[in-house]
Amino acid sequence: MRRRKETYDAVLIGGGIMSATLGTLLHELDPTMKIAIYERLKDVAEESSAAWNNAGTGHSAYCELNYTPEQPDGSIEISRAERIAEQYEVSKQFWSFLIDKGYIASPREFINSCPHMSLVFGPNDVEYLKKRHTAMTRSHLFRQMQFSEDPRQLEEWIPLIMRKRKDTEHMAATKMDLGTDVDFGSLTRKLFAHLETTDTVKVFRYHEVRDIDPMADGRWWIKVKNRMSGKKTEVTADFVFIGAGGYALPLLESSDIKESDGYGGFPVSGQWLVCNKEEIVEQHGTKVYTQAEVGAPPMSVPHLDLRIIDGKKALLFGPFAGFSTKFLKEGTYLDLPLSINFSNIRSLFGAWWHNL
């Protein structure tokens, strides 16, 4: 019989914004709940949540055109955009609550005002954007959205993008001044800093969860390895949350739950250009999203973003397609091949075949 080392009410795997948020919510709901959070790297927010590992867009559906598809009858469906905008408003309310409680000193430490814009080219996309603007401004969530196809107005909004363009080029844009830029790395670290002041939440760095097994009584048996000492421990928990980014797939597969069948990862990554030159950065103060090519995935949409990280402005442009068999920046090139099994080989082949 295996000896139980420690028992928790909840185990959260991964030291990113998802575990930080869930851990904070659980602790606020029940301060007596015993929670363990495991992060395999030396600190939290070092992978996807790190400021330079994401675009920092506070997703409110202001500029993401894939949230508002055009219907066969020519109308624009905005219900998904409304749901996303409402969800982000709830996130902002939660952050305001944390600031009021004193867990975060100032909102400027992680969130800053940054207008969100959609920019399109050609008569068909201009007509689509015009109809989108009309449909969205009927909702109170998007009533402040501005639209223009006047080159002089566009030059005022996005001078860097409009430089050296001809007046004959047919373009249009929408602009929402309520947009935000979010440093999720900073927010994650602040949430963890608060959690570590409590008596019931433990954060383990350099600890890697190696296996998750269901128990007969409905709880979970979790195997953990200390990456510094090599020591292995086992814990049990009533609830397990996998917020481990690219490492979530092998952990999901190790859990042996039926729902894990069929999931696979594909060796696609994104690369970005960064500009820190102050004289250039000061010419662009928005996040500008464009329209994806027909048949292209939503994550391929080119955008030029203002980023504000540690109080310093920079520009981010991309994404450019990359190839990697790593599932994490700090992963290994064996991540993809080791994740392939009989339950997901069909899904992987289908993804490859349909994207030839």
Image: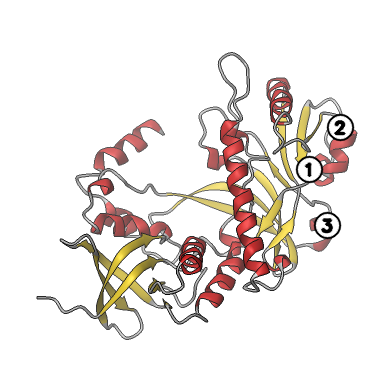
Residue tagged by mark 3? Answer: 282
First in sequence, mark 1 or 2: give its number: 2
From what the image shows, is residue 191 above or below residue 77? Answer: below
Residue 280 found in image quarter: bottom right
Q: Closest to the observer: 100 or 340?
A: 100
Residue 271: image tag:
none
Helix, strand or loop under label 2: helix
Residue reaching furthest to the left: 1
Q: CA distance from mark 3 to mark 1?
A: 13 Å
Q: CA distance from mark 3 to mark 2?
A: 20 Å
Q: Residue at x 51, y 75 (%)?
A: 195
Q: Residue at x 22, y 47 (%)?
A: 258
Q: Closest to the observer: 170 or 233?
A: 233
Q: Residue at x 24, y 63 (%)?
A: 219
Residue 38 position within the rendered picture, expressed as x and y whole percent measured from the top left? 39, 72
Residue 161: image tag:
1
The amino acid type found where label 1 is placed reads: Ile
Residue 187 position within the rendered picture, expressed as x and y whole percent measured from the top left? 60, 66
First in sequence, mark 3 or 2: give its number: 2
Residue tagged by mark 2? Answer: 151
Helix, strand or loop under label 1: helix
Helix, strand or loop under label 3: loop
Q: Quarter of the image containing the C terminus?
A: top left
Please rate how many residues cluster around mark 3, counting C-alpha atoms within 10 Å: few if below 14, some from 14 to 19, many from 20.
some
* 8 left or right, relative to 300: left
Residue 350 at least partly seen? yes
